Image (spheres, rainbow, N blue to C red):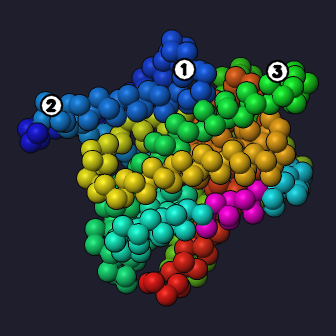
């Protein structure tokens, strides 16, 4: 239907809508058993409902909802700042072999995604660049990486409408990443329970208290002074990350701003530790969870689902195959290689999140699992660092490797 009216929400209106989405999401998960059973994150459940409502209004009433996304970027950066501030060198060292092992798994996933996309695209008569857009460029890379490579594929490789395809593929991946992680973890945890090997109840009972982002609804006692100190550290990370990103811009070492913010957080945390200042983990956790929840609510409720309808059938086929392949990879590779235990199941849920969508989606997936089955410290140590930092470097190398093939 032709658009006859726009209903625009300003910055404050969008913030009100985002908070209502989070409250609605919590109620939806309480009311509907399947959402709890398959550990669907609250922002995903309600955000998609609002996005579907917006699609219905657009198609049948000619009314298009427009949200102001001004706060979305700062909230995402604040979340990554708290991830960096949570990572001291001692904890990274504790990740040890498992961190390196997970990096290897992620590299294999990136190669798999591009091989699937390239193979399917060429078999259906599409330009090979379209296959990469339906591969790790948008699925593991997200909207930002998709936009950057979309312009390159159009200008250098002649792929028509590459930017539009990239945005639609990244949106599709964000939706599937939030929906697949919970069911995959549920299946794996159920397998563990049936086998009597690392049953989640026993794991949770014998583990230490939840830390950081593991259980966002846990009550955490904080003070105003601690909160102010944490806000100051986050602000320093945002400023420092922006400066670093600007310095690296258009160089061989160019990285997305959120990666620079995260790296700045790691530096700030460890410098403060060296001078004897201990970061107050509780306030860091609260502010990080607030930033994450609001960012996801805004991102999902503002999804332009009608953009997915513009995807040609061959591209939809590529994306559906990619989603199935990601779920299978998480179950048969990630879970098995990472130890076939509860931690590996949570890691598999997170892998689905950033393998198809983005790191915030991965954290939300893992939170939904650990909120129900118990904490997994190693998963919340490994996934944020790999999903927010290392994957961008690995992805760039893999994409450039594929672009060097004779078919391009």
Give me the C-alpha separation between circle 1 and circle 3.
20 Å
Determine crowd level at label 1: few under 14, some 14-19, many 20+ residues with C-alpha closer than 10 A.
Answer: few
Q: Quadrant of residue 256?
A: bottom right
Instruction: Name the secondary structure under disc 3.
Output: helix
Name the mark on residue 60. 2
Q: Is residue 390 shown left or right of residue 314? A: right
Horizontal and vertical percent for residue 366?
Answer: 67, 36
- Measuring from the top left, give residue 299's x and y in whole percent: 43, 42
- The residue that appears at 55% across and 74% down in the rendered structure is 399
Q: Please tell me which of labels 1 and 3 falls first in the chain.
A: 1
Judging depth in this view, the residue of 133 and 281 nearest the camera is 133
Residue 180 sits in which quadrant? top right
Q: Which residue position holds label 3?
A: 201
Q: Residues within 10 Å of mark 3 (few under 14, many from 20)?
A: few
In the image, which residues are magenta?
102-111
Q: Residue lying farthest front?
A: 123
| x 72%, y 59%: residue | 105
Q: Residue furthest bottom?
A: 406
Say which label, 3 or 2, has the lower sequence index. Answer: 2
- Whether residue 192 appears in magenta in the rendering, the answer is no
Quadrant where the C terminus sits is bottom left
In the rendered image, which residue does mark 1 sit on? 34
108 part of magenta stretch: yes
Q: Residue at x 34, y 70 (%)?
A: 126
Q: Work out whether 177 lies above or below 32.
A: below
**Identity of the residue drawn at 82% across and 21% down:** 201
Closer to the camera in the image, 39 or 278: 39
Frontmost residue, 264 versus 114: 114
Q: Secondary structure at mark 2?
A: helix
Q: Which is more toward the observer, 311 or 386?
A: 311
């Amino acid at each position: 239907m032709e658009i006859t009216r726009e209903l625009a929400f300003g910055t404050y209106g969008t913030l009100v809508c985002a908070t209502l989405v989070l409250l609605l999401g919590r109620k939806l998960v309480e009311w509907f058993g399947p959402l709890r059973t398959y550990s669907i994150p609250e922002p995903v459940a309600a955000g998609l409902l609002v996005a579907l409502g917006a699609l219905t209004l657009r198609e049948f009433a000619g009314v298009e909802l427009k949200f102001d996304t001004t706060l979305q970027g700062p909230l995402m950066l604040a979340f990554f700042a708290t991830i960096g501030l949570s990572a001291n060198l001692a904890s990274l060292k504790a990740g040890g072999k498992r961190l390196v092992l997970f990096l290897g798994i992620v590299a294999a996933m990136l190669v798999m995604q591009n091989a699937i996309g390239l193979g399917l695209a060429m078999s259906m008569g599409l330009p090979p660049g379209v296959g990469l857009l339906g591969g790790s460029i948008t699925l593991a890379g997200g909207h930002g990486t998709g936009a950057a490579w979309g312009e390159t594929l159009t200008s250098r490789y002649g792929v028509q409408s590459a930017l539009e395809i990239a945005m639609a593929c990244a949106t599709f991946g964000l939706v599937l990443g939030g929906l697949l992680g919970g069911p995959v973890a549920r299946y794996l945890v159920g397998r563990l329970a049936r086998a009597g090997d690392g049953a989640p109840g026993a794991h949770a009972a014998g583990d230490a208290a939840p830390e950081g982002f593991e259980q966002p609804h846990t009550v955490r006692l904080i003070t105003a002074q601690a909160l102010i100190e944490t806000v100051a550290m986050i602000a320093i990370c945002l400023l420092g990350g922006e400066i670093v990103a600007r310095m690296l811009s258009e160089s061989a070492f160019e990285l997305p701003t959120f990666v620079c913010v995260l790296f700045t957080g790691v530096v700030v945390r460890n410098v403060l530790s060296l001078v004897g200042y201990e970061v107050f983990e509780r306030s860091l956790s609260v502010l990080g969870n607030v930033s994450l929840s609001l960012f996801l609510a805004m991102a999902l409720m503002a999804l332009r689902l009608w953009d997915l309808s513009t995807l040609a059938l061959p591209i939809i086929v590529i994306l559906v195959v990619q989603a199935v392949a990601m779920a299978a990879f998480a179950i048969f590779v990630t879970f098995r290689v990472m130890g076939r235990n509860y931690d590996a199941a949570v890691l598999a849920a997170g892998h689905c999140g950033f393998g198809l969508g983005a790191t915030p989606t991965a954290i939300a997936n893992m939170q939904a699992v650990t909120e129900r089955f118990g904490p997994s410290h190693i998963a919340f140590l490994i996934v944020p660092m790999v999903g927010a930092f290392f994957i961008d470097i690995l992805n760039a190398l893999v994409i450039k490797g594929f672009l060097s093939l004779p078919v391009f």
